[in-house]
Image (cartoon, rainbow, N blue to C red):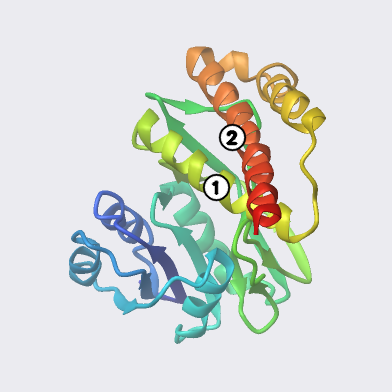
Amino acid sequence: MKIPISLVVVTLNEEKNIQRCLESVPFAAEKIVVDTMSTDKTVQIAQECGAKVFSERWRGFGPQKDWGVQQASHDWILSLDADEVLSEVAQQEVIQMFSQLDPQVGYQFPRQSYHLGRWIWHGGWYPDYQLRLFHRQFSAWKKIPIHELVEAPKKIKLVSPIKHFVFQDLAHQTQTNNRYSSLQALEHFESGKKFSYFKVLIKPWTKFIECYFLKKGFLDGFPGFVIAVGAGFSVFLRWVKVWELERKKNEE
């Protein structure tokens, strides 16, 4: 049975993930993939899964996802990242509640992430609620390039999770931290936040302590330690990159 929901997914070289993502929403009446000029088999696989594929230049996370929503045929939108799947229990939850959905409510799913051979339950990684089901006449992606989010009049938390296959391996985690720290540094720089030695010396440590001790990352074993170190290092990179941007500006 199909439900008048449009699944919208943004991709870039996601051939390892896209089929699993699209097939996790079998009830969607429409599946849309907005691809950013992938060089692998992402587009081919998405088309074989029955998705409408649009090839578009990169606008930034929020604007790209918002553009995809505008291409949908249905007002109810389910937005997933390519490395996410709707769990079977979440599928049933959406199907059962669809007729009672409130258009002015954005529905948040808990997100459970898999990394380094195990599901991660601590360190700030769970429940990590994500607003992914919404009515586009009342809610929309905020058009910001990073930390994208859906703005909705009201929000309700659902019970069943989205499964998130967050990183392929440690190299992928490192690449992602590097990319996101660059975007965050540019955001800080453009908003007028200044580099200081205090920030670069203290903030990485406080982030590690927050993830590993305060949010109990140690309960996830060695992967929890790796995640906390990675979080701290990402903060270190962000502020060093702010310093680099300031230095380049001064040299000009």
Q: Which residue is drawn at 68% across and 56% down?
A: 249
Is residue 120 found left or right of 206 in the rendered image?
Answer: left
Quadrant holding the N terminus: bottom left
Q: Which mark is residue 147?
A: none
Give the residue at mark 1.
Answer: 180
Q: Position of residue 37 (x, y in %)?
A: 30, 69
Graded by Cα atoms within 10 Å as few (under 14), some (14 to 19) or many (20 or more), the crowding at tag 1 reads: some
Give the residue at mark 2.
Answer: 234
Residue 252, compared with residue 125, is above or below; it is: below
Residue 156, compared with residue 182, is above or below; it is: below
Displayed quadrant of residue 174: top left
Do we see residue 154 in this rendering? yes
Q: How far apart are marks 2 and 1 (CA)?
A: 8 Å
Instruction: Give yes or no for contact between labels 2 and 1 (Cβ–Cβ under 8 Å).
Output: yes
> For this rendering, which residue is in front, 166 or 111?
166
> For this rendering, which residue is in front, 193 or 90?
193
Tally of numbered tags:
2
